[in-house]
Amino acid sequence: MASVTRRLAHAATGEHELDKTLSDRARLLLFDYLAVAVRGSASESSATARGVLAADSAPQSAVVEGTGLWTSTPTAALLNAMSGHSIEMDDAHEPASLHAGVVVWPTVLALGDERATSPAEMLAAAVAGYDAACRVGRMLGGATAYARGFHPTGVCGVFGAAAAAGRLLGLSTEQMVSAFGIAATSACGSMEYLS
């Protein structure tokens, strides 16, 4: 039997045809994300982060939603994730108790900007990202994660970002297994900020 990681990697890299229902749902989640990210870009925390991070020296390959500012792909993804969550109106997956959209969409859109990716490829990558983050979130146990001191978005979101980015980059299943291993070393999601 394949490991959980290998099964997750296979799901992220496998050939999937998005039916109309799934495509429509992904588009709705994108519109929802964009609405909260654009509004969130005007928040004080987003403006402060842009002031600190946006002037990086890397190639300006991705847009910061709601600002017209272009910056490096990783910086745009980070700033867009911060804006998307800053007003606390982003999507939520209740069984996993996480906000997958603020991890998946910033990754997909920033990397999509950099690589001039087609909308269909971006939707497929987003679906793979949502699937990975939510599957890991259900395994973590969203309802009990908080009691154990962990925020599921921080713990599980890295798997969604890895799946979405890996899909856009055309990773093989073996490469995706490695990407998930690297993502796992970055997962923390400590709730200590509430203390």
Image: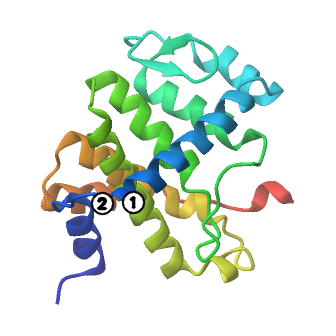
Residue closest to the far front: 20
* SS state under label 2: loop
Does residue 56 lie above or below 79 as drawn? Answer: above
Q: Residues within 10 Å of mark 2 (few under 14, many from 20)?
A: few
Q: Is residue 189 left or right of residue 46?
A: left
Q: Residue at x 25, y 67 (%)?
A: 11
Q: Residue at x 44, y 29 (%)?
A: 74
Asked whether disc 1 touches disc 2, contact meaning CB atoms under 8 Å apart, the reply is yes
Front residue of 53/77: it is 77
**Residue 93 drawn at (x, y percent):** 60, 67
Q: Which numbered marker is on residue 141? A: none
Q: Quadrant of the N terminus?
A: bottom left
The answer to which image quadrant residue 46 occupies is top right
Residue corresponding to mark 1: 22
Q: Residue at x 27, y 61 (%)?
A: 12
Q: Quadrant of the C terminus?
A: bottom right
The answer to which image quadrant residue 177 occupies is bottom left
Q: Is residue 114 left or right of residue 98?
A: left
Q: Which numbered marker is on residue 19? A: 2
